[in-house]
Image: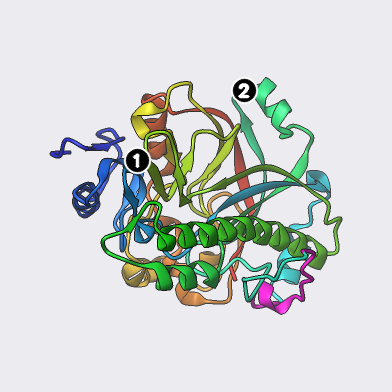
Amino acid sequence: MNQENCILISNQKNWVEQAAKDQLCGVGRLPGVIRAVGLPDLHPGKTPVGMAVLSQGRFYPHLIGNDIGCGMSLFKTEVKQKKFKMDKWVTRLNSIRGLEDIPCDIPYAEACPIRDFGTIGAGNHFAEFQCLDQVYDVDRAEKLGLMDGKIFLLIHSGSRGYGQEILSRFYSPDGLKEGTPKADAYLAEHDNALLWAGRNRLAAAVKLLDYLNVDSRTQRLTDSCHNYVEQTREGWLHRKGSVSAGHHALVIPGSRGSLTYVCVPGRDTHISLDSISHGAGRKWARSICKSRIDRKYDRNSIRSTRYKSQVVCHDTNLLFAEAPEAYKNVEQVMESLLEYGLVDVVATLRPLITFKG
């Protein structure tokens, strides 16, 4: 990076678009921004995705984006892997178009700000049933609850339309000056969105398990948000597509055709503003995916992966837009994180069924 207050966490094997680097430098030039860090999964968007930004005196809601509270929750189910029924579950899930089709009670006293509570949404959001693939740290894996032969459920979702509604009312290219009524009002709603995004992921997990007629009791092993802002001793820390290193453990998935890495943060994450990648990051824009790989797949092969996992999705365009080829190599992202000492890998999880809808 050719800008003093910008840094890119990457290596020569890990490809990062010039457009993403340029966007990150643009963020670094915003008034009050002290430091901008691009993580190995950095890629361009309305604002760059895969970054952490520290500012003083003001913060910027548009750097967080419209899905405040988006994150990933890894649940351990009560279903033993040896009793997992791939064909039965896929058939059952194919009979609904989305989680909106399943009624959902709201077990909270407060009014729910999410219209379709207990849903995952479109785009890169998903629910994925997984099993243990390989263990690298037995002691930590046992402490995290990964070793008893159960099926896992990873939910990637956020605050649904609630975050968009908040951003539309508080967006300002100049940011919000700390301590002002508007800044305080945004932060109150922002925190509410974080709360309900976490509740939404739990509701989606319970809803899926109930619908599959299995025990819906779950244990949430990890829960990490990657779109939010927090006040630290140094200033306002924005995370857009990055996860706090303050978690005891976190997951880094690639695509539906790759493994998910269960990690613990490294001892010294100061260089990355105490932030870690949230995934592999996109390689292709959604609009060009189908034209690039249309001839590679037929209607059935697009719904399976090299791990023999199955994909349940009724939107053909979304199937192509979220194909494994559309994402960067998660192994290369992990290599960069390991090279900088930002994570230690505990285990990998292998996909079984990926549900989108």
Q: Residue at x 55, y 55 (%)?
A: 191
For residue 137, the mark is 2
* Residue 294 coordinates in the image, percent (x, y): 38, 71
**103 part of magenta stretch:** yes
Residue 195 occupies quadrant: bottom right
* Residue closest to the far left: 2
* Residue 335 coordinates in the image, percent (x, y): 39, 31
Magenta: main secondary structure equals loop
Residue type of the residue flagged with mark 2: Asp
Give the colour scheme of this rendering: rainbow
**155 part of magenta stretch:** no
Residue situated in front as seen by the camera: 303 or 203: 203
Q: Residue at x 31, y 54 (%)?
A: 48
Residue range highlighted in magenta? 96-108
Residue type of the residue flagged with mark 1: Pro
The answer, for residue 194, to whether it is visible in the render is yes
Residue 295 occupies quadrant: bottom left
State yes or no: discs 1 and 2 in contact (Cβ < 8 Å).
Answer: no
Provide the secondary structure element on which disc 2 rests.
loop
On screen, residue 75 versus residue 249, left or right, reads: right
